[in-house]
Amino acid sequence: MTADLVIDVRDLHKSYGTRKVVDGLTLAVKAGEICGFLGANGSGKTTTIRMLCGLVRPNGGGGTCLGLDIIRDAPRIRLQVGYMTQRFSFYEDLTVTENLDFVAAVYELDNRREAVKAIIDRMGLADRAGQLAGELSGGWKQRLALAACVLHKPKLLLLDEPTAGVDAKARREFWDLIHDMAADGLTVLVSTHYMDEAARCGRIVYLSDGKLVVQGTPDEVAKGSGLITFEATGPNLDVAARTLRKMPGVESAAVFGSALHIAGMDRAALERAIQSLDGGLAWHEVPPQLEDVFIHLLSQPDRPHA
């Protein structure tokens, strides 16, 4: 393992019967990095995360996580990783404190009471410490789950769509906590479908059909996509969007507030589509956004690794 790589795996394969879920994936994540894991449902994100923490055994390939072999040392890896699943998986009839005390007991932590109090304070859960977990809102449940994942002070945090179904304010506060912990040296691999969350990652990795398609900083991925995007303001934007979606070369046409946004790979086709409208709209070219790239990649067949 390279000294500063917390995750270093190569050519990972995992199949269930004839279905390839992960197909030759190579991934490296540096210490202290927040790496975003993107891709459509079924692209292999969850299976990859479960292989990294030793819950699923790969059919081929291998590598290390925290310097430990992901196959031979799986039990040791699990003790040093915090893994947060998509579903809230704690006891709803126990209080916040009781749930965390149970987790502390599982990890056989010394000074359990002090450890639980410290994480409750750090996660801003003090006012809800005596509340039943089942009575918490979605955002507070996720905060409790995050507290449980980092209670044993892991070196790596694996988050599988941790904020699905959580409101915008709670998501922002959740991500502030992640960045605070990364600033203290924690490494984070997080899967998400939210583009505002992907933009907060230092690097993003996009999977399609179990293969790595593109990776880089959010800016690098957006600029390197080759997408051409135009924006318009004016009247009847919804009507214009509906018309443009049917035009050759227009991969997407969507209204965001008071602006219409179109994207595609063929500049000439986009310009012809714009010119075919009756007018009344003011158009200008804009840089592609991550959401444009994500929609573009979702529509593409397999392409070479980048």
Image (cartoon, rainbow, N blue to C red):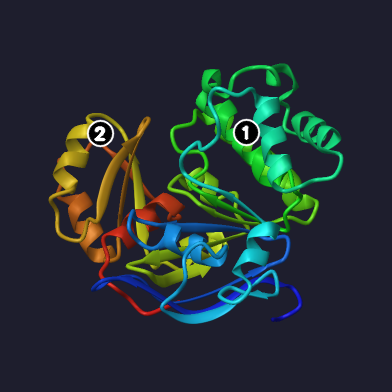
- Where's residue 147, x and y in %? 68, 38
Which corner quadrant holds the C terminus? bottom left
**Mark found first going from the N terminus, 2 or 1:** 1
Q: Residue 297: tell me if it is visible.
A: yes
Secondary structure under badge 2? helix
- Where's residue 17, x and y in %? 26, 71
Is residue 39 depicted above or below 291 in this figure?
A: below
Left or right of 39? Residue 26 is right
Residue at the spot 66% in from the left edge and 40% down from the top edge: 148
Residue at the spot 80% in from the left edge and 51% down from the top edge: 184
Left or right of 28? Residue 125 is right
Residue where numbered disc 1 is placed: 143
- Where's residue 41, x and y in %? 33, 53
Is residue 261 depicted above or below 24 in this figure?
A: above
Quarter holding residue 242: top left
User: Label 2, label 1: how many angstroms apart (C-alpha)?
Assistant: 40 Å
Is residue 202 depicted above or below 181 in this figure?
A: below
Quarter holding residue 128: top right
**For the residue carrying disc 1, how many other residues have a C-alpha within 10 Å: few (<14), some (14-19), or many (20+)?**
many
Residue where numbered disc 2 is placed: 237
Residue at the spot 22% in from the left edge and 56% down from the top edge: 250
- Where's residue 281, x and y in %? 27, 38
* Amino acid found under the numbered disc labelled 2: Leu
* Amino acid found under the numbered disc labelled 1: Arg
Left or right of 211? Residue 195 is right
Q: Nearer the viewer, residue 242 or 213?
A: 213
